[in-house]
Image (cartoon, helix red, strand yellow):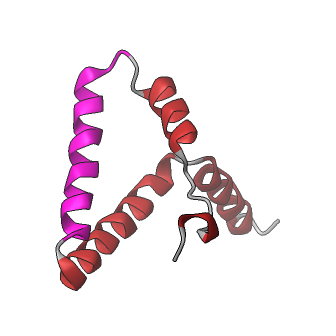
Amino acid sequence: MSHKSRKPLWPDEDEWLEFFREYLCGHPLLSEHVARICFALLEHLSAGPEGVRDARLILKTASRVIYPFTASCRLAYRHYKLSLSGM
C-alpha cells in the first residue's frame, strides 16, 4: 500500500505536540510516565498477535478508568440523579 493512499493518522504530530505542551510542559515526572506507557504499548504491539491483544486490553482499561474524569461522566451522573427523582 502506498503512503499516499493511507488514511491520515489522528492524532497527528501536531495534535500530540499541542496536548503535550498543554498538559506535560513543566511536569517532567508525568512526562516520563507517559513516555513509559507509550513505550510499553509499542513493545506489546510489536510482540505479535498476543501483544496486540494485550495492548488492546490496556487501552480498553485506560478508556474505562478515565471516564469518571470526563465531562460526559458528570453529565451522565446528573441525568442519573434526575431519573432517580422521577423527573
Which quadrant of the view contains residue 28? top left
Q: What x and y, as percent, mark residue 55?
A: 28, 69
Q: Give the residue at x 68% y 53%.
A: 75
Is residue 17 shown left or right of residue 50? right
Is residue 83 shown left or right of residue 25? right
Which quadrant of the view contains residue 27? top left
Q: Which residues are magenta?
A: 26-46
Between 86 and 12, the one lying in front of the other is 12
Q: What x and y, as percent, mark residue 24?
A: 39, 26
SS majority, magenta: helix
Q: Is residue 83 above or below residue 22?
A: below
Q: What x and y, as percent, mark residue 68?
A: 48, 52
Q: Give the residue at x 20% y 75%.
A: 51
Which quadrant of the view contains residue 82? bottom right
Between 1 and 72, the one lying in front of the other is 1
Q: Give the residue at x 72% y 68%.
A: 83
39 inside magenta stretch: yes
74 inside magenta stretch: no
Is residue 84 shown left or right of residue 46? right
Is residue 23 shown left or right of residue 46? right
Say which quadrant the C terminus sits in.
bottom right
